Image (spheres, rainbow, N blue to C red):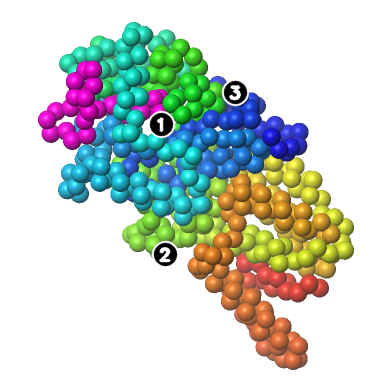
């Protein structure tokens, strides 16, 4: 592992309900599984919150020198329209609405999911297994649970016997008697208990997504896929399982029960959960009808939006709150994030375009310590970004004052490693767009102003400065030239 100082990473573990030192099972290797999307519709801002958050977790672990295997599943069968054991599969329902085959729905929305994640600069997982591609593994785990006395079959349906697992509820703290509507089923008369959940469902003649099994033709329950696929690729015990807070119960609770009762060992060491995105205090989600999908953000094509918002602004907006905090959406908040990102990019570009000088070395050690201290505190990206602003303002001021640090190249290397490789918010010149065009136009006006001052046309020079100031662009003249900052 790379030497990143003496500080130790601490993560908040939902299982223990406290922050713990991060000590992987087999260092420097880390196994990380994050629940992926159910591909029956376009990804929305809530998805972005989850996958941008865990993207930074992945990036920072690799920055620290860990060799991470990142697995993120694609749910393309078995997820019913609610958390109960009745109803229909979400993909089948959407296929009926769009009048296509369920696998066409899966292909369409898997494509748009990765398209939108790519736009947000979210790294692809090392393995993205599909539920439909791992039916044998799921059947094998169900068989093992029956053999171990933790599951039973009734009329082609197989259920997990919750009463057989004395530790059921340890993640969420919920007892079986606390089960609420939507997670307990009163109508499934073939169950021993309402709290028991489906491992395998019998399919009727009209059901398209179905497979042969020892219990007849059917399809897997939603929860079993993650237990089967995560252990297939990461082992029966692994380091990190992530996902949205809404999946803590019942999904993750059921995953633990299945895996630990099948293998008789601890399933996951650290459980990490991101919080939700809200709109005026209400959760955003497809089921609530108030979700804005990511492509609509990028194009501005939604009734709740007044304009298009670049993917890099969405990413920066999400990283300005801690992953375990609620993020409340508004276009005013996005506008503030956009201004902040422009300022950050402007400072980065000033530093990148400046050669080392004769000034005293910048205190890079304290810069690294402050940044890593923030990230080591449960991946606090909001605090890490605040550190970036603070330190880069210091460096730019020295550049403008002609006191250019002699170790500026070392600063650039570190800046790349944290702003680009960890946070994923490096200026993207190839992408162009409104931000780059704005910066280019400001730079052009600075050149015109420079020529005007050379020709002693101070009236034009002052007008450019004053007009830009009215637009919120502050020009700063220094020995190394003129830089600018866009006011928040």
Residue drawn 57% across the image and 30% down it: 30
Nearest to the observer: residue 151 or residue 345: 151
Image position of 153 with respect to 61: above or below:
above
Q: Nearer the viewer, mark 2 or mark 3?
A: 3
Q: How far from the left and from the top, in percent, is residue 232?
A: 43, 26
For the point 35% across and 46% down, the residue is: 110
Residue 222 belongs to magenta span: yes
> Could you tell me if residue 268 is visible in this image?
no
Q: Quadrant of the C terminus?
A: bottom right
- The residue lying toward the viewer, choosing from 480 and 128, is 128
Quarter of the picture containing the N terminus is top right
Callout 3: SS: loop
In this view of the protein, which residue sits in the foreground, 232 or 361?
A: 232
Label 2 close to label 3 by CB (< 8 Å): no
The residue where tag 2 is placed is: 307
Secondary structure of the residue carrying tag 2 is loop
> Seen in the image, is 266 located left or right of residue 74?
right
User: Is residue 217 inside the magenta stretch?
Assistant: yes
Q: Residues within 10 Å of mark 2 (few under 14, many from 20)?
A: some
* Res 79 → quadrant: top left
Label pair 1/3, CB-CB below 8 angstroms: no
Q: For mark 3, what is the residue?
A: 25
The magenta segment is 202-229
For the residues labelled 2 and 3, the Cα–Cα distance comes to 47 Å
């Amino acid at each position: 592992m790379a030497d990143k100082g003496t500080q130790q990473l601490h993560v908040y573990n939902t299982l223990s309900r406290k922050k713990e030192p991060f000590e992987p099972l087999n260092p420097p290797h880390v196994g990380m599984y994050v629940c992926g999307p159910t591909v029956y519709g376009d990804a929305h801002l809530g998805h972005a919150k989850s996958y941008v958050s865990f993207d930074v977790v992945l990036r920072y672990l690799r920055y620290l020198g860990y060799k991470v295997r990142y697995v993120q599943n694609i749910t393309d069968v078995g997820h019913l329209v609610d958390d109960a054991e009745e109803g229909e599969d979400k993909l089948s329902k959407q296929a009926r609405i769009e009048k296509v085959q369920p696998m066409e729905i899966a292909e369409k929305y898997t494509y748009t999911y990765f398209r939108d994640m790519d736009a947000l600069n979210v790294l692809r997982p090392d393995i993205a297994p599909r539920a439909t591609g791992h039916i044998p593994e799921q059947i094998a785990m169900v068989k093992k649970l029956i053999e171990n006395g933790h599951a039973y079959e009734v009329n082609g349906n197989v259920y997990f016997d919750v009463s057989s697992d004395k530790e059921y509820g340890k993640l969420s703290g919920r007892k079986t008697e606390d089960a609420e509507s939507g997670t307990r089923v009163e109508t499934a008369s073939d169950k021993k208990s309402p709290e028991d959940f489906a491992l395998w469902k019998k399919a009727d003649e009209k059901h398209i997504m179905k497979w042969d099994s020892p219990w007849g033709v059917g399809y897997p329950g939603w929860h079993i896929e993650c237990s089967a696929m995560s252990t297939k690729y990461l082992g029966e015990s692994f380091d990190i399982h992530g996902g949205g807070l809404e999946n803590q119960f019942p999904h993750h609770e059921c995953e633990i029960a299945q895996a630990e009762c099948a293998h008789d060992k601890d399933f996951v060491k650290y459980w990490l959960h991101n919080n939700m995105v809200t709109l005026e205090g209400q959760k955003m989600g497809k089921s609530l009808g108030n979700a804005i999908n990511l492509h609509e953000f990028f194009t501005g094509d939604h009734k709740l939006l007044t304009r298009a918002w670049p993917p890099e602004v969405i990413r920066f907006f999400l990283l300005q709150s801690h992953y375990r905090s609620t993020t409340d959406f508004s276009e005013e908040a996005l506008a503030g994030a956009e201004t902040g990102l422009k300022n950050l990019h402007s400072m980065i570009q000033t530093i990148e375009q400046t050669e080392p000088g004769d000034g005293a070395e910048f205190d890079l050690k304290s810069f690294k310590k402050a940044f890593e201290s923030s990230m080591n505190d449960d991946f606090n990206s909001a605090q890490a970004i605040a550190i970036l602003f603070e330190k880069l303002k210091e460096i730019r001021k020295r550049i403008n004052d002609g006191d250019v640090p002699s170790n500026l190249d070392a600063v650039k290397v570190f800046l790349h490693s944290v702003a680009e490789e960890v946070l994923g918010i490096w200026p993207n010149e190839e992408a162009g767009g409104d931000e780059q065009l704005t910066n280019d136009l400001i730079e052009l006006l600075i050149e015109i102003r420079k020529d005007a001052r050379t020709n002693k046309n101070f009236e034009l020079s002052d007008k450019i400065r004053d007009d830009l100031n009215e637009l919120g662009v502050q020009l700063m003249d220094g020995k190394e030239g003129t830089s600018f900052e866009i006011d928040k």
